[in-house]
Image: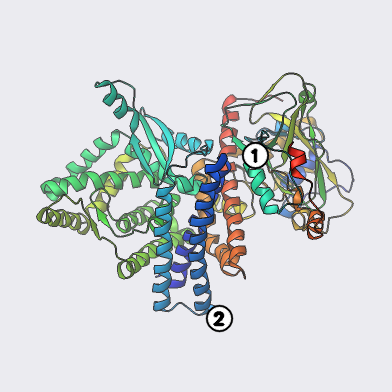
């Protein structure tokens, strides 16, 4: 029987391991594959590795995304203007200065209902200009899937990224109590169960559905593309 | 014997899945095309071909729902009608696959190469260079050697490259990649020597030019099946049965290939023989039996409902020779020669194929449960001893913390285990999922889309599992990663 501390705050390494080994699957934190625990587990976080899948925008004929268009059409447009890159494990990806691509964690994560998490970069990579997310580093309790990196090189020289390198870390936080609506059960959960880097689904937000139904005039596309 | 409802649901699920895969392939393919031709093709294929296929599926969906309303079992008339309807969809799909051969602008995922390399590692000795390409069938071709010889008029050493073909629509479906094991075996030169050794054991049991020829062609197929079983066991067996259903041909005897139903019977016997402890795992035994029954019943319905050549022999052959070939075919089957080839072959191949049948059903069942929960299965942790739970609450020193790391360390699963667990999950849950997502839906379109999301999600999980397990192994090979 594992005793869970009632401390509320960031989980330390022992609490993280306890949660990973918990007998009750609903209480368990899953991080798989954990290739090298000795290297990856830090005092209050776990290092995450870069996966092999990237999504790149092909923007040469792309003016903007009209959020009020039919979601099916937007999805199609996004597919047309996005290129998927799957790397061989021994291959690499070059991220040029000021380039923005989506990537994914190698690890699959599952959080219990009483723990949230934050995704952060690692300082070694930050010092050469690699950002792993722009704004969205928060992971809701109950989340299950890989995490999408919003990779950007804000440095001056290109960065060679190899699959499997540790570019991020995740820290875990206790909630004051279990959530009653874990992420996958939320009606508007758009990224639950993601396995690959997933493009934005902002246009599926209910606000846009309301605006669509109100027939708000769309922007004049000719102006935007001129 | 399985009931007709289960049979119809199985083949219906295959027809829907193939349509989903064709649609997904076309969609990705057109996303990569630019300009006016992309629009024309998109209209023609996505708004034309797929629309027609979906209309046909919908017609069968409605009929199935009416006939099974209030849990009625299917009458013989309803079974025949549904069989013909779904069979027609398979024929259309086959036609459509042939006509999209020119669409090859989709990059091939590295996972196929990872699997190919893992298969090749199981063969002893030097092996040829392979490359993978898309076609409408599983096949292999020694391409570069032929081309170089034709152009130069002389033998050029080390120029052989084998092209392995996989059907476009299976590009992201690792469960069906088990067929690569079969095709790769055809390129294994040692196979000819093994076949010669086996031939010697039959002595005068094989007689005449036709039997000799069939022994060589059919023997190669049977041996390649044995390799498929040795590497993927259950996975190869089920994928072969579903492949035969999708191909819409269970009974044809042709000169190059023995009838699929016969091959399935032989594989079933071999699985039974190898899985000596099969009784301890009734779920595995049921799967093997059920799928054999599905194949048999499918063959019955094929014989009575559709016009199919039971013998497929070259056109240029004269009637007398045709009769002789047909007789030779019957003799090879009736005298149990094919079965014997598989048994002797299994023993002899043991010296050349390192991989043996997977027998850790406990592990497979565990991985299957993980898949059911939507987890990736690239690696596994050792089972924990309960004493760890007491230890963990009394950690005092740094060393004790480091010791804990050993308990959460994971070992990569082999691609063979991943694919087998995938098949196990699929077979145990597939019809239930098909029923929930597709049949029980009020709207055909919604059912189709829900089922599509489900199928594509599991493709992604398996692909990610294969990819991660390779990367995991790659890091292990690098040695201690430090800390």
Give the image's coloring scheme.
rainbow
Q: Is residue B318 visible?
A: yes
Residue placed furthest toward the top: A157
Q: Where is residue B74, by image quadrant?
A: bottom left
What's the CA distance linking mark 1 and mark 2? Answer: 47 Å
Question: Relative to A213, is B82 on the left or the right?
Answer: left
- Badge 2 local density, few (<14 within 10 Å), some, or many (20+)? few
Front residue of this view, candidates B191 and B146: B146
Q: Which mark is residue B5?
A: none
Q: Which mark is residue A82?
A: 1
Front residue of this view, candidates A92 and A105: A92
Subunit under mark 2? B
Q: For the residues labelled 1 and 2, say whether their Cβ atoms are less than 8 Å apart.
A: no
Question: Relative to B266, is A57 on the left or the right?
Answer: right
Residue marked by disc 2:
B70
Front residue of this view, candidates A164 and A24: A164
1 vs 2, front mark: 1
Question: Relative to B314, is A193 on the left or the right?
Answer: right
Kindly indicate whether the residues beneath marks 1 and 2 are on one polypeptide chain.
Answer: no
């Amino acid at each position: 029987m594992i005793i869970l501390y009632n401390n509320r705050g960031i989980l330390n390494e022992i609490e993280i391991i306890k949660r990973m080994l918990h007998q009750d699957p609903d209480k368990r934190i899953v991080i798989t594959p954990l290739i090298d625990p000795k290297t990856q587990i830090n005092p209050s976080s776990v290092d995450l590795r870069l996966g092999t899948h990237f999504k790149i925008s092909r923007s040469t004929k792309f003016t903007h995304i009209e959020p009020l268009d039919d979601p099916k059409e937007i999805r199609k447009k996004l597919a047309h203007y996005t290129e998927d890159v799957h790397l061989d494990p021994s291959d690499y990806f070059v991220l040029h200065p000021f380039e923005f691509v989506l990537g994914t964690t190698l690890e699959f994560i599952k959080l219990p209902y009483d723990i949230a998490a934050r995704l952060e970069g690692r300082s070694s990579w930050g010092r050469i200009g690699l950002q792993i997310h722009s704004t969205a580093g928060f992971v809701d309790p109950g989340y299950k899937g890989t995490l999408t990196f919003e990779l950007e090189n804000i440095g001056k020289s290109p960065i060679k990224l190899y699959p499997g390198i540790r570019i991020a870390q995740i820290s875990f936080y206790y909630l004051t109590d279990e959530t009653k609506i874990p992420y996958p059960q939320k009606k508007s959960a758009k990224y639950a169960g993601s396995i690959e880097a997933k493009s934005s689904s902002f246009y599926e937000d209910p606000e846009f559905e309301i605006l669509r139904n109100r027939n708000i005039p769309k922007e004049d596309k000719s102006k935007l593309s001129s | 014997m399985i009931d007709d409802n289960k049979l119809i649901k199985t083949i219906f699920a295959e027809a829907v899945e193939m349509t989903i895969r064709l649609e997904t392939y076309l969609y990705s393919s057109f996303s990569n095309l630019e300009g006016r031709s992309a629009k024309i093709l998109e209209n023609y294929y996505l708004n034309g071909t797929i629309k027609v296929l979906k209309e046909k599926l919908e017609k069968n969906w409605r009929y199935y729902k009416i006939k099974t309303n209030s849990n009625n079992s299917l009458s013989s008339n309803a079974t025949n009608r549904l069989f013909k309807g779904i069979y027609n969809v398979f024929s259309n799909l086959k036609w459509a696959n042939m006509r999209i051969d020119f669409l090859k602008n989709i990059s091939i995922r590295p996972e196929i190469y990872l699997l190919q390399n893992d298969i090749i590692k199981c063969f002893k000795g030097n092996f040829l260079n392979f490359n993978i390409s898309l076609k409408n069938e599983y096949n292999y071709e020694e391409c570069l050697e032929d081309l170089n010889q034709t152009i130069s008029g002389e033998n050029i050493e080390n120029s052989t490259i084998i092209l392995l073909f996989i059907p476009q629509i299976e590009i992201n479906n690792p469960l069906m990649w088990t067929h690569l094991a079969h095709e790769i075996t055809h390129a294994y030169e040692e196979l000819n020597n093994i076949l010669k050794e086996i031939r010697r054991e039959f002595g005068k049991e094989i007689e005449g030019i036709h039997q000799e020829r069939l022994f060589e062609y059919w023997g190669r197929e049977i041996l390649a099946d044995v390799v498929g079983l040795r590497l993927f066991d259950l996975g190869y067996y089920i994928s072969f049965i579903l492949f035969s259903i999708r191909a819409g041909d269970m009974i044809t005897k042709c000169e190059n290939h023995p009838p699929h139903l016969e091959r399935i019977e032989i594989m079933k016997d071999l699985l039974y023989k190898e899985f000596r402890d099969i009784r301890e795992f009734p779920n595995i035994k049921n799967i093997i039996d059920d799928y054999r029954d599905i194949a048999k019943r499918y063959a019955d319905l094929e014989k009575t409902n559709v016009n199919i050549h039971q013998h497929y022999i070259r056109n240029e052959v004269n009637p007398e020779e045709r009769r002789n070939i047909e007789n030779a075919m019957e003799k090879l089957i009736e005298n149990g020669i094919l079965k014997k080839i598989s048994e002797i072959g299994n023993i002899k191949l043991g010296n050349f194929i390192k991989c043996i049948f997977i027998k850790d059903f406990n592990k497979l069942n565990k991985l299957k449960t993980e898949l059911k929960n939507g987890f990736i299965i690239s690696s596994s942790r050792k089972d924990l001893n309960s004493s760890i739970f007491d230890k963990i609450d009394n950690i005092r020193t740094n060393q004790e913390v480091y010791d804990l790391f050993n308990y959460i360390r994971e070992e990569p699963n082999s691609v063979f285990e991943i694919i087998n667990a995938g098949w196990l999950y699929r077979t145990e849950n597939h019809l239930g999922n098909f029923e929930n997502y597709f049949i029980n839906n009020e709207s055909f379109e919604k059912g189709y889309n829900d089922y599509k999301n489900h199928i594509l999600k599991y493709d992604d999980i398996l692909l990610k599992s294969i990819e991660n397990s390779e990367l995991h192994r790659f890091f292990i090979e690098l040695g201690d990663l430090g800390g």
